[in-house]
């Protein structure tokens, strides 16, 4: 997987974070740069670490499914994409402003919830040729930027933008899964 696809993957994964950050900007419209940066750092950290954890578990079973690993990567990315798109049409539980998104416990739970898809992507990394360090750092950095931009957007626009971003993120993940599958099938696998 080349760097261009890592960037695209990172962008796709960051749309959940963007949506949550929009709701944080809505819930705390007076948020300053340092508090917003703390939120974005926590979200980016979890989004960057989860692929490492997923990779560890994926690499444990990779030898067992090496002949059809491209189907696993395609399936995981497609399921995550469909899940993100489906969640964009569900009730707005991510935009619940009844809890303080700046409280550490709420922030940690938001970070875990938005990075579960990165765990699954990391699992698929075990079946692909990818620079794990480059991928995790890129995913974390792009997520940080998405978090900061989301809070800024939430302060100035409204909640509808977050749902649209989830749809785009889901479509990106599905397209990456299709690309992985078509590349592997095109190579005779």
Image (cartoon, helix red, strand yellow):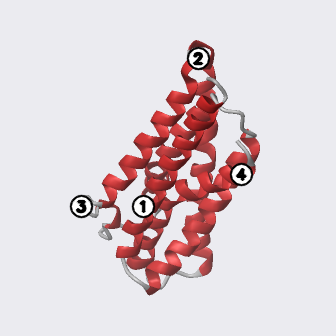
Residue marked by disc 2: 67
- Say few, some or many: other residues with alpha carbon within 10 Å of mark 1 (under 14 / 14 to 19 / 20 or more): many
Residue marked by disc 4: 137
Of callouts 4 and 1, the N-terminal one:
4
In front here: 56 or 102? 56
The image shows residue 150, relative to residue 121, as above or below, that is: below
Whole-percent x, y for residue 64 in the image = 57, 13
Whole-percent x, y for residue 65 in the image = 56, 17
Which tag is nearer the camera, tag 4 or tag 1? 1
Mark 4 lies on a secondary structure that is helix
- Calculate the distance from the C-alpha at mark 2 to the C-alpha at mark 4: 29 Å
Of callouts 3 and 4, the N-terminal one:
3
Mark 2 lies on a secondary structure that is helix
- Would you say residue 168 is visible in this rendering? yes
Whole-percent x, y for residue 88 in the image = 33, 60
Residue marked by disc 3: 91
Whole-percent x, y for residue 29 in the image = 44, 83
- Calculate the distance from the C-alpha at mark 3 to the C-alpha at mark 4: 32 Å
Which tag is nearer the camera, tag 1 or tag 2? 2
Q: Which mark is residue 166?
A: 1
The image shows residue 149, relative to residue 137, as above or below, that is: below
Q: Quadrant of residue 32?
A: bottom right
The image shows residue 54, relative to residue 37, as above or below, that is: above
> At x 71% / y 51%, what residue is drawn?
137
> At x 39% / y 68%, what residue is drawn?
164
- Answer with left or right where residue 87 lies relative to residue 153: left
> At x 44% / y 42%, what residue is drawn?
78
- Calculate the distance from the C-alpha at mark 1 to the C-alpha at mark 2: 32 Å
Which tag is nearer the camera, tag 1 or tag 3? 1
Mark 3 lies on a secondary structure that is loop
Of callouts 2 and 3, the N-terminal one:
2
């Amino acid at each position: 997987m080349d760097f261009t696809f890592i960037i695209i993957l990172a962008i796709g994964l960051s749309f959940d974070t963007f949506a949550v950050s929009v709701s944080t900007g809505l819930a705390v419209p007076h948020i300053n740069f340092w508090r917003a940066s703390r939120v974005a750092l926590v979200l980016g950290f979890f989004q960057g670490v989860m692929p490492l954890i997923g990779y560890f578990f994926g690499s444990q079973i990779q030898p067992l499914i090496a002949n059809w690993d491209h189907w696993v990567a395609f399936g995981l990315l497609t399921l995550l994409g469909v899940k993100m798109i489906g969640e964009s049409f569900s009730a707005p539980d991510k935009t619940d402003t009844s809890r303080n998104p700046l409280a550490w416990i709420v922030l940690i739970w938001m970070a875990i919830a938005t990075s579960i898809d990165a765990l699954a992507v990391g699992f698929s990394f075990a079946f692909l040729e990818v620079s794990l360090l480059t991928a995790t750092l890129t995913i974390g950095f792009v997520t940080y930027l998405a978090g900061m931009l989301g809070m800024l957007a939430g302060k100035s626009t409204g909640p509808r933008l977050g749902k649209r971003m989830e749809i785009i993120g889901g479509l990106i993940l599905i397209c990456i899964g299709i690309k992985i599958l078509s590349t592997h099938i095109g190579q005779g696998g």
